[in-house]
Image (cartoon, grey):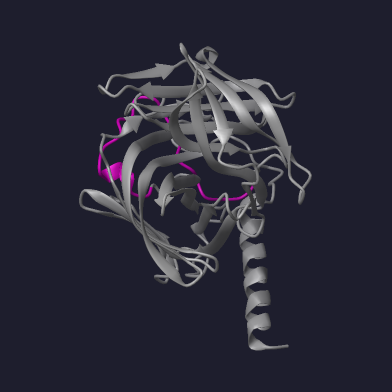
């Protein structure tokens, strides 16, 4: 067996171990309801997780950094690029997960924080998603998430905050990205001043803000060739300790940079019958006036499904989304934008570039995410 094969098998074993930490159900997991923390077991001393509570005011740039006391956190950048006149979608995502761990474990190798990174390129000419993933325990300068500012990394993959702009840099087998993101608008607080409810229970919530209408420029490399690219993007940052209730099986989410300078985010948590368990969203107009939508003001209606030839999962890739008085049609850049992330987060989901239409006319570009159609994600 050659050295490349041995290294590949070692990496697979490591990723499988990390995945087990993140997705193996704990039969004793529960929410205690205590105001000071959320814990996952009462039978032995384990990591206490901080709760999301009303009244907290997000602060910038401090809250753009990591919140290690919470169970789960992510920095999500999605967008569109123009490559020699051709539209491409891209995604760069970093997750920080704090697994259940006996807090009396003194070992420096104990996985107190796990970092996971996903990257994807949506190219209609290729016909299916190009994607890559990495995972590592935080520490030893190999992976981590800084507090106080955005700087998250796994090996040489990185998203960092540099003064007024952000930078994402990564090198995968099929593509490389080195992109700068310049904000053109202030942070958009989701939910009630940044507290986004995900269900009827008070603890089912996240702290959540978005940076829509980011101006993008930088370098894309493919097939040994580097090209300058430009476009627009959307950054989401969320952290939580109880993201999805047991009665929910997944979610549908869309973030759209509208052509008039406004921005729309809408989501719904789905119940076991495929209906809406909870919903939310926000629209900020080009003049800066924002409106937060109540659950009954958001409606997702599927228009067309696509079946994955690899997993057999059926995804509703075309939608009518209604947010208050605004109704938009969502169409994918192309259908096959399925992510297989079983080697890192243990799940398969659909996320890809999508166009928005109002009354049949192009109105914006963004991303659509569909989870729980393969299996319920275990967060």
Image vertical order of residue 269 relative to residue 71, above or below? above
Task: Name the residue at 37% across, 30% down.
Answer: 259
Q: Where is residue 4 shown, x and y percent of the image? A: 63, 83
Q: Which quadrant holds residue 183?
A: top left
Q: Residue at x 68, y 46 (%)?
A: 26
Q: Quadrant of residue 307?
A: top right
User: In the rendering, at what x and y percent does residue 324 appear?
Assistant: 47, 13
Q: Is residue 284 left or right of residue 12?
A: left
> Is residue 42 in view from this perspective?
no
Q: Is residue 141 left or right of residue 307?
A: left
Looking at the figure, which quarter contains the N terminus?
A: bottom right
Foreground of the two, 45 or 355: 355
Residue 43 magenta: yes
Residue 89, how many percent across, how many down? 49, 47
| Residue 291 in view, yes or no | yes
Q: Is residue 113 left or right of residue 309?
A: left
**Main secondary structure type of the part rendered in magenta:** loop
160 vs 243, nearest the viewer? 160
Give the residue displayed 41% in from the left and 54% down from the top.
Answer: 84
Q: Is residue 21 above or below residue 284?
A: below
Give the magenta-colored segment's residue range. 40-66
In the image as oriented, which residue stretches furthest toward the front?
A: 85
* View extreme (bottom): residue: 2
């Amino acid at each position: 067996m050659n050295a490349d094969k041995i290294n590949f098998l070692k990496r697979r074993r490591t990723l499988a171990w990390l995945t087990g930490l993140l997705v193996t159900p704990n039969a004793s997991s529960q929410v205690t309801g205590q105001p000071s923390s959320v814990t996952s077991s009462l039978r032995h001393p384990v990591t206490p997780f901080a709760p999301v509570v009303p009244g907290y005011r997000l602060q910038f740039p401090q809250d753009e950094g990591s919140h290690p006391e919470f169970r789960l956190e992510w920095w999500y950048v999605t967008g569109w690029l123009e490559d020699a006149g051709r539209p491409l979608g891209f995604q760069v995502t970093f997750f920080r997960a704090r697994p259940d761990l006996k807090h009396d474990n003194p070992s420096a190798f104990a996985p107190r924080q796990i970092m996971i990174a996903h990257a994807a390129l949506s190219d209609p000419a290729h016909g299916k998603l190009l994607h890559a993933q990495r995972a590592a325990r935080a520490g030893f300068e190999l992976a981590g998430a800084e507090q106080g500012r955005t700087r998250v990394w796994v090996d040489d993959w990185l998203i960092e905050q540099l003064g007024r702009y952000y930078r994402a840099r990564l090198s995968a087998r099929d593509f490389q990205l080195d992109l700068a993101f310049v904000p053109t608008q202030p942070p958009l607080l989701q939910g009630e001043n940044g507290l986004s409810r995900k269900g009827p229970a008070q603890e089912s919530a996240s702290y959540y803000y978005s940076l829509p209408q980011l101006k993008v420029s930088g370098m894309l490399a493919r097939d040994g060739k580097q090209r300058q690219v430009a476009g627009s993007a959307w950054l989401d940052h969320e952290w939580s300790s109880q993201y999805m209730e047991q009665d929910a099986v997944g979610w549908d989410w869309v973030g759209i940079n509208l052509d008039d300078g406004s921005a729309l985010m809408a989501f719904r948590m789905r119940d076991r019958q495929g209906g809406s368990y909870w919903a939310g969203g926000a629209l900020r107009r080009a003049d800066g006036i924002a409106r937060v939508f109540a659950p009954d003001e958001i409606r997702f209606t599927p228009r067309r499904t696509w079946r994955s030839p690899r997993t057999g999962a059926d995804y509703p890739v075309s939608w009518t989304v209604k947010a208050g008085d605004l109704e938009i049609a969502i169409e994918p850049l192309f259908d096959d934008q399925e992510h297989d992330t079983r080697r890192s987060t243990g799940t398969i989901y659909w996320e890809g570039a999508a166009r928005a239409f109002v009354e049949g006319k192009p109105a914006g570009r963004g991303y659509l995410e569909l989870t729980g159609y393969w299996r319920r994600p275990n967060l």
